[in-house]
Amino acid sequence: MADGRPENVVIDIHGLTKRFGDKTVVDDVSLDVRRGEIVGFLGPNGSGKTTTIRMICGLLRPDGGSGTCLGLDILRDADRIKRQVGYMTQRFSYYEDLTIRENLDFVARIYDLPDRVAVVKRTLERLGLYQRRDQLAGALSGGWKQRLALAASVMHQPKLLLLDEPTAGVDPQARREFWDEIHDLATDGLTVLVSTHYMDEAERCHRIIYIAYGKIVARGTVDEVIQSSSLSTMIVSGRDVGAIAKAVRDQPGVEQVAPFGNDLHVVGPDPALLKTAVEAALAASGSDAVATAGETSLEDVFIRLMQTAQAADQPGNGKAKGEASP
């Protein structure tokens, strides 16, 4: 223990708040991340993810709250935190008129890394960039730009890696390879906090945290978050699912209706009421489609959380309070 905190806690923040003018972008956020964890930070655009990440790593000073990052105070030790953190932004931020090797050499100079040439070579080999080392960054595809950005973020061997929408606009194979690399790094002891919009990426995290309108509204493992939602799902399979969707959409107990190919997913909080609504829609449509109980997905839960947060954020309702956590 150090200062009353477990030694394996890498991020430990409490009541973090940030305002821009009269708008509160991050509102009383508390979270912790342990060493070697990959924690997914999820939420709609404008929910406060990037602002929170920037406050954690010392790039932005909070208006309220306190906490530590890598055992250092986020208010007093921002400069020391920056040197021990790797931060990969959503927008590619390296020089497109420099080669891959030249970009990494530039970053190594910024960190004043000893034996710079060897460090750059080792990083190129580690991230599979060595054969492309003399290629201009501006000529790279999205996946290779992403790999270069990751290489630059981990070259100084940070203890914490912060990733802000790292795979936006990248093809599925590059995304999978990126996540395989992240898990390899975490196995070696690196801690990762990653913001993402992709549900399959969220499912590859050890834990997830969902933020909406500046407040954390759910956290836990994927299974815990799904279970705590108390949602049920019916899957309708067959012809005319479009007509069935129209018939069931406004029925009592139905919160979400979404087509998936030839199937229809119908989601609601009360399994008995949901079943009754689906059966009534099938009868009214005269369809020979079949309805069966299905598994609620993480996407279903997040849509529900976003809808709830939007309703709570409307004028006169106040902001969402508390958490839908287990």
Image (cartoon, grey):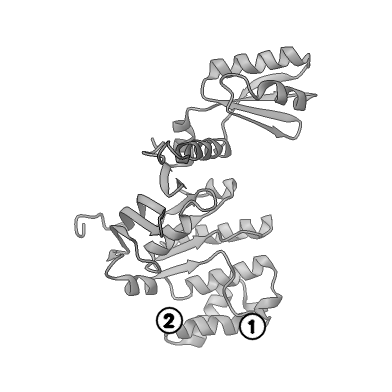
Q: Residue sitting at 48 percent across and 39 percent down?
A: 314
| Between discs 1 and 2, the one toward the N terminus | 1
Up-down relation of residue 283 to residue 25 (above or below): above
Residue drawn where x is 46% and y is 62% of the image: 162
Q: Quadrant of residue 318?
A: top left
Q: Amino acid at mark 1?
A: Thr
Q: Position of residue 134 (x, y in %)?
A: 66, 83
Which residue sits at x=53%, y=37%? 307
Is 40 positioned to the left or the right of 35 in the image?
right
Q: Residue at x 55, y 58 (%)?
A: 165
Q: Which mark is residue 99?
A: 1
Q: Mark 1: which secondary structure?
A: loop
Q: Position of residue 111 (x, y in %)?
A: 43, 81
Q: Residues within 10 Å of mark 2 (few under 14, many from 20)?
A: few
The secondary structure type at the circle numbered 2 is loop
- Depth order, front residue of 150/36: 150
Q: Residues within 10 Å of mark 1 (few under 14, many from 20)?
A: many
Q: Position of residue 167 (x, y in %)?
A: 60, 59
Q: Position of residue 256 (x, y in %)?
A: 61, 30
What amino acid type should be assigned to the residue bearing mark 2? Answer: Tyr
Whether residue 202 is visible, yes or no, is yes
Q: Which residue is mark 2?
A: 111
